[in-house]
Image (cartoon, rainbow, N blue to C red):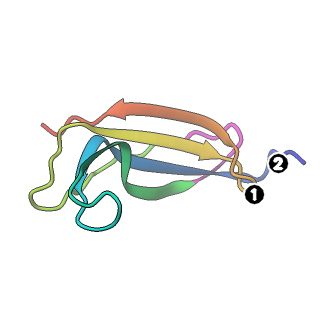
């Protein structure tokens, strides 16, 4: 059943590193360096909105000390409340300068 026009959609953003690496110390990959893509750094619920409503937010990103800020991407999603179907998405590179 599709959501009614009165139901609020969920808006979230994800902060991702385009690329990350990890050194594995145990298990079948012990001693290997693994490369990863689109690694989620944080997931934040921005708000909820009704169909046709506009949501605008300033985004302030806080990275821990020593974090590499190069290669960061911000992705915003608007999803249905129950099933989570993605209705809209946008992506942008993060400029940390």
Characterize the magenta stretch by its predominant secondary structure. Answer: loop
Q: Which SS class for mark 2? A: loop
Q: Earlier in the sequence, mark 2 or mark 1?
A: 2
Spot occupied by residue 79 in the image (x, y as percentages of width and height)? 65, 46
> Up-down: is 24 above or below 60?
below
Is there any visible trace of residue 58 in the rendered image? no
Per the rendered image, the range of residues in magenta is 48-55
Nearer the camera: disc 2 or disc 1: 1
The residue tagged 1 is: 82
Label 2, residues with CA under 10 Å away: few <14, some 14-19, many ≥20: few
Image quadrant assignment for residue 27: bottom left
In the image, is 31 to the left or to the right of 93? left
Q: Which SS class for mark 1? A: loop
Residue drawn at x 75%, y 53% is 83
Q: On the rendered image, what quadrant is the C terminus found in? A: top left
Question: Nearest the camera: 33 or 68?
Answer: 33
Question: Nearest the camera: 87 or 48?
Answer: 87
């Amino acid at each position: 059943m599709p959501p009614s026009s009165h139901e609020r959609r969920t808006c979230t953003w994800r902060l991702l590193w385009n690329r990350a690496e990890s050194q594995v110390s145990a298990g079948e990959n012990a001693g290997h360096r693994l490369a990863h893509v689109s690694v989620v750094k944080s997931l934040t619920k921005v708000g909820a909105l009704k169909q046709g409503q506009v949501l605008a937010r300033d985004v302030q990103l806080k990275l821990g000390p020593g974090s590499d800020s190069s290669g960061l991407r911000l992705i915003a999603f608007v999803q249905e409340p129950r099933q989570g179907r993605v209705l809209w998405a946008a992506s942008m590179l993060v400029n940390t300068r």
